[in-house]
Every structure is written in structure tokens, then in C-alpha cells.
Image (spheres, grey):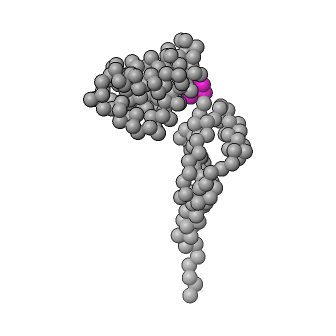
Amino acid sequence: MNSTIISSRYARSLMDLAIEQNSLEKIGSDMSLIKKVCGENMILNAIMRNPNINIGSKKNIVRDLFGKEVDKLTLDFIILLIEKRRIVYLKEIANEFKNLYNIQKGIKVATIYVARSIENNAKDRIIHLLEKEFSCKIELIEKIDTSVIGGFKIVIDDKIYDASISKQLQQLKKSFAKNLYEKGF
């Protein structure tokens, strides 16, 4: 079965359970933590993907690692994934859960590309302007991209607002490519 289908089904099931048990906020923060851990801890990923390590050992590792940090529902969900041999999809499930959570809460994710890190007050102003423009809560993700040179580029939904110097240079180059003047000599 396709990993996208699997992660979508498990994330939807966890979302439904979290809503049913009125613990959506806690499960949302748990899944963000799991997403972060799965992205940063390659040893954990290797252990969970290794078929030679038995299920009991994997359960114990997960209990030791997440037992005190996450809600019981989240821990039981991860244990279920281990038992069903679907633990290899944990990061994808966490990503899909985050997407479903954002939809449920009316949050849009905006990615801002900048040449160097921006200050918190500038981020707050950008978030405020985007929330005003899109009439919803905005989660801003900052990514450093030196090809921007200066300024910024914001991607939200299917819209791109490009106020970067590299874009302005491209437009300038394009305008110079059009020869509006012919030599009169």
C-alpha cells in the first residue's frame, strides 16, 4: 500500500480519537514533538526501521523515550504502529496529522525565504499582516536561502509573494534584454 495512503489513514484515525477525547491540543503538540524527534534522531529511525530488532525492544525504547513526554493516547498510538509494523511511517503520519490539525484549527502555513535570519518583531509584523490578509491564523516557517540575496519571498497556499532582490535583478535583466532603442547610426 502507498505510504501516503497509510499515513493519511492513521493520521485521520488519531485525529478522530483526539477530537473524541477532547485532547486535540495535547496530541497536536505531541505529534509536533515526534515529528521533530524523527527528523533529528537518525539512530531512532534506524532502530525503528530495522526488522531484526524485536517488537518488544522497540516498545521499550519508545516508552523510555516518550513515556513521560507525551499523552497516553499518543504513546498507545505509537505502540500500535510498532505492533502493526507501521512504525516506519511515523514521520509521515506526524506530518499528515499536523496538516489535518492545521485544517481543523483554521491555520495556514506560510514559508518565508530570507538571506539571513529575521528578528522576532519583524516576524510578528509579517504574521500580523498575513493574518489580516488571509483572515486566519498564520504559522510562519523561516528558511534561510542565500539565493534570495536580500528581501524575502513568502509562499502560502498556492500564492507566492516575491520581494527578493534576486527577483528584481531577474526583472531588470529581462527588461534590458528587450532592446527598445535601435541604433540610429
Q: Which portion, as a residue range, is magenta?
A: 102-106
Which quadrant of the rendered structure holds the N terminus? top left
Q: Position of residue 83 (x, y in %)?
A: 34, 19
Left or right: residue 162 compared with residue 15: right
Q: Nearer the viewer, residue 110 or 167?
A: 110
- Residue at image position (56%, 78%) is 182
- Residue at image position (47%, 20%) is 75
- Residue at image position (49%, 25%) is 66
Q: Is residue 126 among the parts visible in the rendering?
A: no
Q: Nearer the viewer, residue 177 or 144?
A: 144
Image quadrant where residue 132 sits: top right
Q: Is residue 58 among the parts visible in the rendering?
A: yes
Q: Nearer the viewer, residue 37 or 114?
A: 37
Name, please, the residue furthest toward the top.
20
Q: Position of residue 80 (x, y in %)?
A: 39, 18
Image quadrant where residue 157 sits: top right
Which quadrant of the rendered structure holds the C terminus? bottom right
Count of marks, rendered view: 0
Q: Position of residue 78 (x, y in %)?
A: 42, 22
> Residue 159 in magenta?
no
| Vertical comparison of 112 with 67: above or below | below
Tell me the chief SS of the magenta region: helix
